[in-house]
Image (cartoon, grey):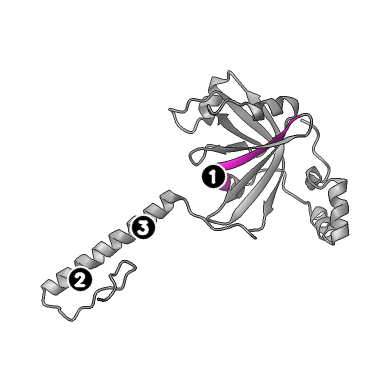
């Protein structure tokens, strides 16, 4: 792994980028950020907790010619593991067997992970260098999301720096499972209220009005 830049954000803020920042008026603000220490270079406890919740991430690589490639990686929450404050890992599962990411890493180890939480409208970019590990049964078992996971190899990422983005322009979306659970809770509560109402009426309380719910039928 190459020595990290003196200023962590220089992994992304190249001279060309800084020139454009100067031209467009944002360079001074980023200089102040750099003077305060700049981007983080280790995974905090809060970030580790955020990573543990992710079920979907995007991994960017590039080949020796600089041709970029982005691959989606998904799995149950926790499939992307924090191994320590500077290291991430996940198992490489069987797919379409194009091996583009693997091939790119043989030529160029530099990667960028993009994590986005649509519910909380948060996103994190993580830069580093990655390597593919084969034949390490202990590591594969440690990284496997479940005991039934058929892992072929592991991808280990040495983190160099990371940046949290603002929530601007992130649409708020919810996982289907979370919506289904919320609707089930609502329906259960409605059923409980309707049961309580029926019991009150059976005891002679005819003056009791039905509760207003989103499932109420329109007046005919």
Count of residue discs: 3
213 or 89, which is in the foreground?
213
Q: Residues within 10 Å of mark 2 (few under 14, many from 20)?
A: some
Q: Quadrant of residue 209?
A: bottom left
Q: Quadrant of residue 110?
A: top right
Tell whether 188 sits left or right of 137: left
Q: Position of residue 37 (x, y in %)?
A: 78, 51
Residue at 48%, 39% (x, y): give it: 76
Secondary element at tag 1: loop
Q: Which residue is mark 3?
A: 183
Q: Position of residue 163 (x, y in %)?
A: 70, 49
Q: Which residue is mark 2?
A: 197
Q: Which of the pair 7/104 is nearer the observer? A: 104
Q: Which residue is mark 1?
A: 54
| Image location of residue 190, percent across then percent down | 28, 64
Dots 2 and 3: beta carbons under 8 Å? no
User: Could you tell me which residue is drawn at 55 percent across and 56 percent down?
Assistant: 120
Can you say which quadrant of the picture contains the N terminus? top right
**Which segment did they paint magenta?**
50-63
Give the CA separation, mark 2 to mark 1.
42 Å
Residue 188's disc number: none
Please state which of the two labelled residues, at mark 2 or mark 3, is closer to the viewer: 3
| Mark closest to the chain's N terminus, 2 or 3 | 3
Q: Residue furthest bottom?
A: 207
Image quadrant where one finds the C terminus: bottom left
Q: Residue furthest front?
A: 220
Q: Image height check: is 47 above or below 101?
A: below
Earlier residue among tags 3 and 1: 1
């Amino acid at each position: 792994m190459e020595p990290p830049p003196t200023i962590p954000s220089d992994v992304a803020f190249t001279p060309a980028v800084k020139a454009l920042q100067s031209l467009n008026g944002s360079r001074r603000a980023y200089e102040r950020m750099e003077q305060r220490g700049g981007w983080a270079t280790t995974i905090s406890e809060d970030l580790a907790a955020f990573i543990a919740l992710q079920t979907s991430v995007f991994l960017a690589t590039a080949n020796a010619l600089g041709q970029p490639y982005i691959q989606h990686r998904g799995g149950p929450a926790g499939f992307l593991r924090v191994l320590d404050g500077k290291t991430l890992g996940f198992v490489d599962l069987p797919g379409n067997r194009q091996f583009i990411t693997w091939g790119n890493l043989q030529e160029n180890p530099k990667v960028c992970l993009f994590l986005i939480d649509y519910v909380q409208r948060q996103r994190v970019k993580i830069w580093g260098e990655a390597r593919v590990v084969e034949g390490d049964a202990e590591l594969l078992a440690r990284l496997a999301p479940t005991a039934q996971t058929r892992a072929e190899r592991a991808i280990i990422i040495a983190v160099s720096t990371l940046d949290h983005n603002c929530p601007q322009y992130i649409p708020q979306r919810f996982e289907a499972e979370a919506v289904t659970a919320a609707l089930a809770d609502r329906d259960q509560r409605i059923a409980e209220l309707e049961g309580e109402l029926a019991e009150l009426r059976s005891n002679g309380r005819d003056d009791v009005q039905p509760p207003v719910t989103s499932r109420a039928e329109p007046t005919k």
